[in-house]
Amino acid sequence: MEVMSKKATPVSDFGIRVSAAIRAEAGMRRVSGRQLAAIMGKSPAYVNERIHDNKEWTLGDLGSLCTAWGMTPEQLLSKYRS
């Protein structure tokens, strides 16, 4: 019997840009990963995987953070456009 390995789906280029914008904004606001998790109602491990680009942020994640920060997703992404 063949054992199927679970390969992680690589994070897209856009996902990496979203993650970089979230990290930058969190840094500007001096918000830790644990604080991000509390804002989002997620576990610190969930946030950690995304902060380190191991998994993609969801649209819901982006929306909840932007709401908490008083900005739209468009504002967040354009603020840190490279």
Image (tube, grey):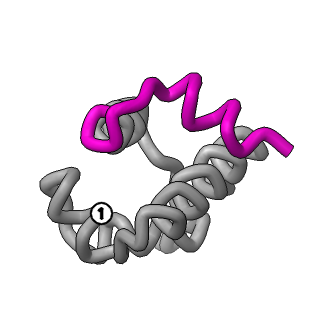
Looking at the image, is 26 positioned above or below residue 52? above
Q: How many marks?
A: 1
Q: State which quarter of the image contains the C terminus.
A: top right
- Residue 62: x and y, percent? 41, 38
**For the point 57% across and 73% down, which residue is it?**
52
Dot 1: element: helix
Looking at the image, is 10 positioned above or below residue 67? below
**For the point 62% across and 50% down, which residue is it?**
21
- Residue 32: x and y, percent? 35, 76
Looking at the image, is 79 positioned above or below residue 19? above
Camera-side residue: 79 or 50? 79
Please say whether residue 55 is visible from this viewpoint. Answer: yes
Camera-side residue: 52 or 65? 65
- Residue 73: x and y, percent? 49, 28
Please say whether residue 7 is visible from this viewpoint. Answer: no
- Residue 64: x and y, percent? 28, 38
The verdict on residue 10 being magenta is: no
**For the point 46% across and 47% down, which residue is it?**
57
Looking at the image, is 74 positioned above or below residue 68? above
Q: Specify the principal SS of the magenta part.
A: helix
Magenta residues, as a range?
A: 67-82
Q: Amino acid at mark 1?
A: Leu
The verdict on residue 69 being magenta is: yes
Q: Residues within 10 Å of mark 1 (few under 14, many from 20)?
A: many
Give the residue number, with chain letter if any, for mark 1. Answer: 36
